[in-house]
Amino acid sequence: MLACTKTNLAVIKELVHAGSQPGLRNKDGWNTLHIASRVGKREVIEFLLGRDRDLWNTRSRNGRTPLHTTALHGRLDACEVLLQQGGYNVDEADNCGTTPLMDALRNGHTDIADLLIRQHKADTAKEDQLGRQCLHLAAEAGNSASVVYLNQYGDFNVNSQTLTSGVTPLHLAAKEGHQGMIHLLISLGADVHCKDSKGRTALELARSSHQKACVDILLGHSTHD
């Protein structure tokens, strides 16, 4: 496991040939493939899968697969190998309902998102346990590149509300203080007057979160409308 945090394949091979077992797990449920996927060294992942063809089919204690790990950390090469050699359902979610596509877009890895969507038909409208879609997560994280990328798909709904709390991407961007994201969402048609399940607009959430710059932006749009 320690060797797999680095990129020296020779050391990994020596340990495996001496009897180390790639499928053993640590206290969090990670095995060597989870760890290697975080680093993203293609030849290490290919070697591990060559030793155990079923190694891809594993989950950590919180339900995350090696594919989640590659998507989260933006490891495109590793992601390609796992999708080629593993039997993944690309929309498979962890214990929080997070899919690899959500991880990729929340962190701005649009190259991995493109691989998952175009080649493997990942669902951009999939929801996590809080009812958030990829767009909500990208807006909450302030990743404009991901929002621009998602805008090219027909099911893009900038005013999509979560089932649990009724928040829109604009609500989440305002709460987190992402000024550029607010401008972007409004330019894409976000409704500044939309209310969540508690009757709050994005402006009210910005105020309660002490995001003064966001308040000023939203106040200007609310007054103009």
Image (spheres, helix red, strand yellow):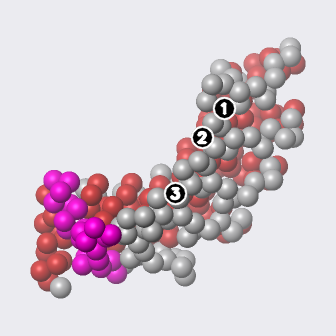
Task: Say which residue label 2 marks.
Answer: 62
Q: Position of residue 96 (x, y in %)?
A: 54, 50
* Tag 1–tag 2 contact (CB < 8 Å): yes
Q: Mark 2 and mark 3 in contact (Cβ < 8 Å)? A: no
Locate the N terminus and report the quarter of the image it occupies. Answer: top right
> In the image, which disc is placed on residue 103?
none
Q: What's the residue at 71%, 66% (across, down)?
A: 119
**Distance from the alpha carbon under mark 3 to that under mark 2:** 14 Å
In the rendered structure, the answer to whether residue 94 lies left or right of residue 49 reads left
User: On the rendered structure, is 205 left or right of 84?
Assistant: left
Answer left or right for 104 relative to 195: right
> Main SS type for the magenta part?
loop
Q: Which residues are magenta?
A: 189-211
Asked if labels 1 and 3 touch by Cβ distance under 8 angstroms, the answer is no
Residue tagged by mark 1?
29
Residue 76 is one of the magenta-drawn residues: no
Which residue type carries mark 3? Gln
